[in-house]
Image (cartoon, rainbow, N blue to C red):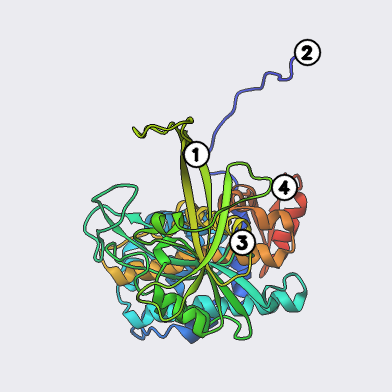
């Protein structure tokens, strides 16, 4: 028996049922933003005034682009095409939507102080969300006494003539113009704690101390934070700052003559790890005031025959070739545990790629640097909004989903808007693939 039966002819019509949407699942995001009073918070922190008769304010265009990025837009036009959906406009209360030129012009009005205020907005919204999560019992992240923070930089290759784009470190396309943003992530929630939009010729650690001062000033003041970063952040000034303020670090070491230094150490086998050895030692660079704790592990990767010409009575021992991993840290852990703990940092690189590839972090660009910096902060808000909603849901499955998965199963859901007087009702199919996740998603926007 066939699993399929013939169907009749289909007649297509373009003037069918009105008030349909293919992205009804973004309405809970819109209502969630209303619930947390996004526009009020934005306007209280970001002080950008437009002419009295202006139809659109900065908070309006940030809101429109933010929702567009969550739906999947990676350029200005795509973000605003999202709002051609009459259901979204009606549920969000929009009578008219600006064109991409108008939106771009408003972003180009911004000054450096507005970018600083948008960075503060990210912190303020996080603080509000964390407090709400604690009060409702869905997350205690705001009360954790010790928290790890991953810092990393990323490269965004650009084409054309964007202000601030420059040749610098670019592993994807050597010699191409790029931007080089700096980011800090919280592993527990996957959210971006802070981001700086930087020119392409900025070195990884450029401004890292000021970046860290700003970040830690906006985190719970009674907490201790452990900064985890790659060798680009092996900077004495950063370590001095963290030491002076009672915070910790786990940073991969980048040092001229490192291999020679490690060869002098006493290496011990790692139990249960054939071919692996470990060591720990104190070391002080010439530019440092104090010595610091270093730990290292090495992995045997090759045994080569000893080719020495010197005559020996017995067969010469083979030459051993190792791969070395060395870290400077404040944490009291064995070398192997330190190495494994550092390895968890790779997850933050995955989150960066999610933010870039799935939310469009650094994708929406204009010709002006500060406008691009504001769009960068908007993308951070879009990415974090999904992280915050996932955290507040209390649903473990939703918390594990990346933006693309949320978009496929929760955002791109067909719906029909019904109106009765001043009441709006959005209908969805009762047969959702993940009913429990879908129900908590709807509840977030109720």
Residue 318 is marked as: none
Of residues 54 and 292, the one drawn nearer to the viewer in this rendering: 292
Q: For the N terminus, give its image quadrant.
A: top right
Residue at the disc numbered 2: 1
Residue at the disc numbered 3: 27
Of residues 232 and 261, the one drawn nearer to the viewer in this rendering: 261
Give the secondary structure at mark 3.
helix
Residue at the disc numbered 4: 429
Query: Marks 3 and 4, how far apart in space?
Result: 15 Å
Of residues 416 and 381, the one drawn nearer to the viewer in this rendering: 381
Residue sitting at 50 percent across and 79 percent down?
Answer: 242
Local packing at callout 2 (Cα closer than 10 Å; few below 14, some 14-19, many 20+) is few
Image coordinates of residue 137 in percent, x first then y, are 77, 73
Give the secondary structure at mark 2.
loop
Q: For the C terminus, give its image quadrant.
A: bottom right
Asked whether the residues under the numbered discs 1 and 2 touch, taking CB atoms below 8 Å apart as contact, a structural biologist would say no
Residue at the disc numbered 1: 301
Does residue 214 show up? no
> Closer to us: mark 1 or mark 2?
1
The correct choice, above or below, for 127 with respect to 264 in the image is below
Image coordinates of residue 146 in percent, x first then y, are 65, 75
Local packing at callout 1 (Cα closer than 10 Å; few below 14, some 14-19, many 20+) is few
Of residues 311 and 78, the one drawn nearer to the viewer in this rendering: 311
Local packing at callout 3 (Cα closer than 10 Å; few below 14, some 14-19, many 20+) is many
Q: Residue 285's quadrant in the figure?
A: bottom left
């Amino acid at each position: 028996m066939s699993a399929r039966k013939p169907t009749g002819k289909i007649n297509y019509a373009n003037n069918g049922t009105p008030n349909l949407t293919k992205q009804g699942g973004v309405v809970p995001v819109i209502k969630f933003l209303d619930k947390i009073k996004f526009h009020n918070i934005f306007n209280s922190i970001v002080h950008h005034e437009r002419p009295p008769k202006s139809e659109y304010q900065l908070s309006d265009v940030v809101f429109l682009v933010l929702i567009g990025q969550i739906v999947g837009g990676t350029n200005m036009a795509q973000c605003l095409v999202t709002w051609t959906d009459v259901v979204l406009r009606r549920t969000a209360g929009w009578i008219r939507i600006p064109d991409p030129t108008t939106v771009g012009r408003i972003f180009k009005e911004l000054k450096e102080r507005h970018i600083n205020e948008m960075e503060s907005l990210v912190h303020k919204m996080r603080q509000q969300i964390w407090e709400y999560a604690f009060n409702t019992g869905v997350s205690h992240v705001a009360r954790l006494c010790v928290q790890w923070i991953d810092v990393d930089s990323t490269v965004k290759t650009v084409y054309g003539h964007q202000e601030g784009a420059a040749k610098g470190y670019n592993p994807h396309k050597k010699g191409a113009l790029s931007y080089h943003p700096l980011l800090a992530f919280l592993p527990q929630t996957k959210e971006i704690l802070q981001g700086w939009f930087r020119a392409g010729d900025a070195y990884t650690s450029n401004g890292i101390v000021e970046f860290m001062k700003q970040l830690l000033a906006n985190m719970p003041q009674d907490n201790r934070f452990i900064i985890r970063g790659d060798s680009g952040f092996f900077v004495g000034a950063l370590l001095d700052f963290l030491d002076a303020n009672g915070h910790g670090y786990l940073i991969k070491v980048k040092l001229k003559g490192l291999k020679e230094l490690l060869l002098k150490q006493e290496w011990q086998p790692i139990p249960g790890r054939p071919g692996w050895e470990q060591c720990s030692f104190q070391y002080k660079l010439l530019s440092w005031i104090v010595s610091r704790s270093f730990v290292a592990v090495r992995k045997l990767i090759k045994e080569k025959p000893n080719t020495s010409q010197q005559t020996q009575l017995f067969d010469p021992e083979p030459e051993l070739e190792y791969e070395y991993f060395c870290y400077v840290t404040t944490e009291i852990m064995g070398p192997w545990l330190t190495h494994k703990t550092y390895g968890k940092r790779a997850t933050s690189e995955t989150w960066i790629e999610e933010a870039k590839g799935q939310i469009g972090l650094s994708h929406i660009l204009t010709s002006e640097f500060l406008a691009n910096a504001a769009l960068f902060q908007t993308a951070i808000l879009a990415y974090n909004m999904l992280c915050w909603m996932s955290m507040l849901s209390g649903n473990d499955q939703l918390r594990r989903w990346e933006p693309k998965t949320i978009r496929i199963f929760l955002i791109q859901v067909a719906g029909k808007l019904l109106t009765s007087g001043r009441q709006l009702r959005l209908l969805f199919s009762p047969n959702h693939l993940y009913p429990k996740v879908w129900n908590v998603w709807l509840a977030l926007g109720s």
